[in-house]
Image (cartoon, rainbow, N blue to C red):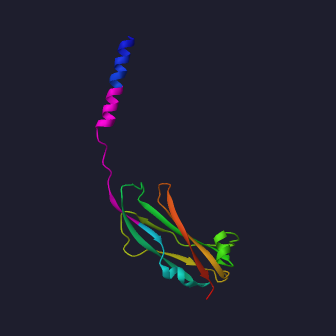
């Protein structure tokens, strides 16, 4: 009985190894993926004014990928944090008292946007002047995300 069990296990393990090593896997599907990155230089370089609606123009980038985003949705968001009295204080990220959320832009990563997407910031008339950190982030819908930041001036000429 012991010898039969050993031979059975040997055939089972051998069969599994042959199947796992000898049969090629499914080839990954490659597709063009569309992503957004923040933002045009003109958006960053302009002085943002309290009481204004500011447009943030996203830049469309393409890549070829085999990684499949299960939802194919990417949510792009941006938030303005400040004010800071100077750039050095901003870079230390201490003391922000205001947060202004921009509108969220969602795209299907398989479809090229027909026009560059825009997020809108509605700046309160009493928003204090100063340097603000503009944080932007893309949530890919699979638990992963990417982002960055820029510095903008509000109420400063």
Q: Position of residue 55 (x, y in %)?
A: 51, 79
Q: Considering only vertical position in the picture, is 124 above or below 148?
A: below
* Residue 153: in magenta span: no
* Residue 30: in magenta span: yes
State the image quarter where residue 68 is shown: bottom left
Q: Considering only vertical position in the picture, is 16 above or below 113?
A: above
Q: Nearer the viewer, residue 99 or 33?
A: 33
Answer whether residue 73 is visible to the viewer in this image: yes
Q: Nearer the viewer, residue 72 or 86?
A: 86
Q: Nearer the viewer, residue 132 or 111?
A: 132
Give left or right: position of 132 versus 112. Answer: right
Q: Position of residue 142 (x, y in %)?
A: 47, 54
> Which residue is at 52% across, 76% downward?
120
- Quarter holding the C terminus is bottom right
Give left or right: position of 2 versus 154. Answer: left
Q: Position of residue 12 (x, y in %)?
A: 34, 25
The magenta stretch is: 13-34
Q: Considering only vertical position in the picture, is 149 above or below 29?
A: below
């Amino acid at each position: 009985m012991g010898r039969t069990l050993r031979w059975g296990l040997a055939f089972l393990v051998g069969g599994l190894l042959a199947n796992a090593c000898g049969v090629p896997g499914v080839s990954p599907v490659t597709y063009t993926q569309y992503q957004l990155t923040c933002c045009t230089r003109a958006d960053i370089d302009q002085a943002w004014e309290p009481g204004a609606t500011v447009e943030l123009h996203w830049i469309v980038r393409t890549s070829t990928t085999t990684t499949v985003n299960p939802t194919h949705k990417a949510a792009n968001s941006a938030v303005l944090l400040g004010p800071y009295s100077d750039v050095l204080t901003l870079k230390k990220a201490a003391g922000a008292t205001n947060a202004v959320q921009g509108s969220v832009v969602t795209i299907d990563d398989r479809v090229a946007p027909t026009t560059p997407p825009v997020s809108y910031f509605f700046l309160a008339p009493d928003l204090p002047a100063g340097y603000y950190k503009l944080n932007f982030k893309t949530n890919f819908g699979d638990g992963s995300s990417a982002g960055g930041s820029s510095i903008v001036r509000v109420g400063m000429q």
